Image (cartoon, coloured by chain):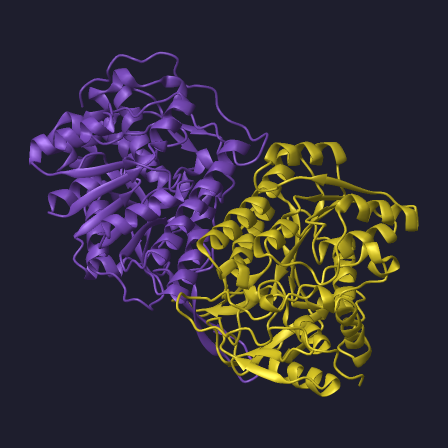
Chain colours: A purple, B yellow
Amino acid sequence: MRVLVLGGDGFCGWPTSLYLSDRGHDVTILDNLSRRNIDNELEVQSLTPIRPMGERIRVWREVTGREIGFENLDLATEYDRLADYLAELRPDAIVHFAEQRAAPYSMRSVRAKRYTVDNNVRATHNLLVALVATGSSAALVHLGTMGVYGYGWSGSAPIPEGYLTVKVPTPDGEIERQILHPANPGSVYHMTKTLDQLMFAFYAKNDGLRITDLHQGIVWGTQTGQTARDERLINRFDYDGDYGTVLNRFLMQAAIGHPLTVHGSGGQTRAFIHIRDSVRCIEIALENPPESGSQPMVLNQITETHRVADLAKMVSEIMGAEIANLPNPRQEADENELKVLNDQFLALGLRPTTLSEGLLEEGVEIAQRYRHRADLTKIVARSVWRAGMQTSEDLLTKLPELPEEH
Amino acid sequence: MRVLVLGGDGFCGWPTSLYLSDRGHDVTILDNLSRRNIDNELEVQSLTPIRPMGERIRVWREVTGREIGFENLDLATEYDRLADYLAELRPDAIVHFAEQRAAPYSMRSVRAKRYTVDNNVRATHNLLVALVATGSSAALVHLGTMGVYGYGWSGSAPIPEGYLTVKVPTPDGEIERQILHPANPGSVYHMTKTLDQLMFAFYAKNDGLRITDLHQGIVWGTQTGQTARDERLINRFDYDGDYGTVLNRFLMQAAIGHPLTVHGSGGQTRAFIHIRDSVRCIEIALENPPESGSQPMVLNQITETHRVADLAKMVSEIMGAEIANLPNPRQEADENELKVLNDQFLALGLRPTTLSEGLLEEGVEIAQRYRHRADLTKIVARSVWRAGMQTSEDLLTKLPELPEEH
């Protein structure tokens, strides 16, 4: 397949691009390098050293003989160039990662809130309009988020895959209706993904676009079989308070001897998936697109759920790290249960890579190898959901000696 | 109350501004004059002659002694100026009309689709962010649309006011949940109003903003008690295929001797409200805002429903006009029923101005007075919902003699 990967420079986009290329697909990346620019803005970097895009692609060619195309393009503002590429490349499929993806970043300032909405909504809508305008029948796979569903809405029922059948009262008795699961986003970022859903529904209905929306859990892990082939292909490892995600942050914190930062009680249950499963899910979704005329296909891209406090305890026990309970900068329930259906990916052949000590070790090894790159002032989360919410001071001011081998 | 009217130069915004000013409120209009600029783009004008904003405001002052403020400001792109005005004026309430509001326009081209989303989403989101950033507790009243609900979704049950109580199956039996009525927009324009709803829900929940969303039907009529006080205060009368709305179009067509343009069978039932009731509803909504911490209040701003074919028949009988059945440029069901609850406005004191021959005559009189301003090439609707859909040729090439008095 000829596949366009929009946002192919990011934490999920890059390993997806390499995986699809490795599997024999003809991959072109469109990316405006916004993830690197936000690093500049936040004055932080991936713990792992990320090479320039040109070098990444050159090394991939040297290692595999495979070509990946790249264009620096801003989907939100360069509609005409986007439409030109679609018309020229005539892709069979498109993977859309090209959105600002951090909830804390999306809440940190006026500028960040506005950027998240302006970028994400316009990028998605420009793409949909361009697909219609160029008469493309490409299958579109979009990275959504479990966060569209919120938590605790459906009682003891597991979260379904996108759609929910409910009973609606009428004067003539109850009728059954299938609805898009009600949106309960917890941040401006999550909100943009609920907006995406409504745009997908409209363009699928009005124009017959073939759309798959993947509601992904929190991705953990760093490397895939492809990114591990050369250090210059290494994937991002974000550990900062805005872009770092919970399990990877714990692994990094343990590896450098920093207390594990649990916000609030840690009673929040979250859904997880390993980056290796994430890239495999993308391929499965590409291979199983909906027909034109169907409503968007929604799949929950998760493999397991864990309570944050339990993850901290597990990492603490394996690594001997302390746990620090910090104020929660988010507005959310202190405790929640979470059950999620992921039947469709399992039926389509996904074999989950669940949490295991071996894989945790890989994260720790990476974190230890690059610990000298850590900026200790970037670890504590300080983007608050409302002005005036309490945050913590830095817990460490200098990098401790390596913790003892365990 | 100190009231900001965003989009106060438009068909609903202008009479609302005058009405609120007449009622003793301190009104300031923010508007980028986009409605006038779209007239330029479409090469069409309001049938009624619209004066420059400066003249409108000067005449209002001459006639009433009341001041209305005005700033030319683009909400979607001039965030900083918007925030400055909010901080400076500290309004008690804000009425938000500042969105591209025509469904056919929103479907007519790549440019129009993109403009509708980029403008409407950014305008609304910038406003929400600015209210949070300036610590405003102003009540926000937004003009939504009945089109968020779609048609025929809830069987014989009437469309509720925003929220719907449904039963959700769980392993422990059914549970009741109140949900935002599922979104079923019929155009890119209507879609933007469904996106607004999700943004309102988030900012009401996260930041305690006080928001009322008015799901308005099709507005008919032209003048209010205020706009009729001087010809230079006259309200818009749009008759073209993009911005003209069905009943006003029929009245204008009858008045100039043009066949009444019914698309498809005319079996679609629509909700209506007179412009005089519309401005009164705004005031009622301003006087009854939700508390901070509440979900957005949703009211259906309609007074009656009619089948399009029945309206055509009625106007035809009164005025002696022919009816022309043209291809439908929209993708929609050829027939639909429509029952809508509007209990809240009735309980809050709205006394509906329903369709009556007297009010129809007023529209006909205006149309006859300004018939020389009609451009016959702009009457047939030509913005299609998908490329290749059939449209009609112009039905008239020159203005006929005035129809006989009836």
Q: Position of residue B28 (x, y in %)?
A: 77, 43
> Residue visible at 23% across and 57% down?
A345
Tally the marks: 0
Please determine whether, in this image, residue A267 is positioned above or below residue A49.
Answer: below
Of residues B231 and A2, the one drawn nearer to the viewer in this rendering: B231
Q: Position of residue A200 (x, y in %)?
A: 40, 58
When asked about the image quadrant of residue A313, the answer is top left
Tell me the quarter of the image containing the C terminus of chain A: top left
Q: Is residue A325 left or right of residue A301?
A: right
Please determine whether, in this image, residue A397 is positioned above or below residue A38.
Answer: above
When asked about the image quadrant of residue B360, the answer is bottom right
Please determine whether, in this image, residue A368 is positioned above or below residue A60.
Answer: above
Q: Position of residue B145 (x, y in %)?
A: 61, 62
Of residues B372 and A363, the one drawn nearer to the viewer in this rendering: B372
Q: Position of residue B142 (x, y in %)?
A: 66, 53
Q: Is residue B243 left or right of residue A264?
A: right
> Residue visible at 38% across and 54% down?
A128
> Residue visible at 25% across and 48% down?
A88
